[in-house]
Image (tube, grey):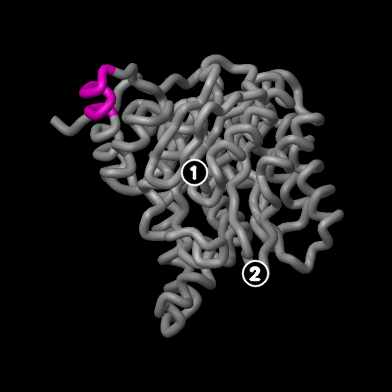
Amino acid sequence: MQIGVILGDVHASVSPVDHLDGLLRQVEAAQRAGVSHITMGQHFLYGDLRWLQPIPTLARIAAELDDHVTVATTVVQVPLYHPVMLAEDLATLDILTRGRLVVGAGAGYREDEFVALGVDFSRRFAMFDEAIELMKQAWTADTVEFEGAFWTVRDGQPHIRPVQSPHPPIWIGALKDQGVRRSARLGDGWPITPETRLPELLRLLAVYEDERERLGRPQVKHPLRREIIPAATTDAAFARFEGMAKERLLAYANRQLATRDADEIAREFREVARKETFIGTPDECVAQITEFAALAPVDTILVRAQWPHMSSDEVVAYLDDLGRDIVPAVAGISSVNRVVRPG
């Protein structure tokens, strides 16, 4: 089992230079910890938080990476781009990483981003499907001839081809059945969100596998976006996660939990953490990962090392713990090839 890191957002009060320096320090620590993937998500007009754009940032970070580390966009919002522009940007990134790119792609979920950029939010899934088809042509065809509902390219002459053939692997994000089927049809893996609880996760993996079988496509293993929180004791691990993700505690309060006392909020947080993270002593974390791998075909666990309020020293300390206690311990774990179905 491999471990990757998703680079997150910081408060806008952090200077842009300090933000970049913090990312580079985080990447250095992640490599020292033995991670396999460095990934970034994407948002626009994000208010009090800053999320650097993934394609140029990953291009900068690629210069710092060892040959065994893959970079990934998790995920780029495809409908907000012209597909030819996005295809050429990603092909360039694949070249800059010498063929070590995974394209994580999604249709987006924040309507305000689409409104600001003049894109019809209600048509984003149809746009996504068409864009992926056009991007694949731009990566593989000698001449692009494409006429769709949203974009038309006639006699297009691609000039930037990715290193990977026919193109980089594509992870397609999804939350529900229709999206998971789309991921099975168009992509090479489904990046599983941390909020997807185990029973629903197993059901959706079965939906994915059934669609792949219907299409005659090979089965794959999937990246799992989920926190791993080790500490010397179980209580210390929960306390650590509360410290890392305290803004999630505030989110619970905003969802009508404000009338509860601090102990009730902490208990609620712990219940969610048990279901959405691997948490506890290192041995407990490894046992939880082993149990999960026996049920679901996953190949990389993507963790978030930095939350907006954390200092670089705290991020590095977390990654050092991960590299010492978790990465080598899970290296020998291999997940099942197909989801374990009830009965």
Q: Quadrant of residue 341?
A: top left
Indicate the secondary structure of the residue bearing disc 1: loop
For residue 138, the mark is none
Magenta region, main secondary structure: helix
Q: In the rendered view, does 39 fall on the left or right side of 60?
A: left
Percent x, y for residue 198? Answer: 32, 43
Pointer 1: what residue?
226
Q: Which residues are magenta?
A: 209-216
Q: Nearer the viewer, residue 1 or 121?
A: 121
Say which residue appears at 38% left-offset and 22% top-offset.
220
Q: Is residue 190 above or below residue 49?
A: above
Q: Is residue 188 visible?
A: yes
* Separation of residues labelled 2 and 1 (CA atoms): 25 Å
Q: Is residue 15 above or below residue 331?
A: below
Indicate the secondary structure of the residue bearing disc 2: loop
Say which residue appears at 53% left-offset and 51% top-offset.
80
Q: In the rendered view, does 81 fall on the left or right side of 33?
A: left
Percent x, y for residue 149? Answer: 38, 45
Q: Is residue 210 magenta?
A: yes
Q: Is residue 75 above or below residue 9?
A: above
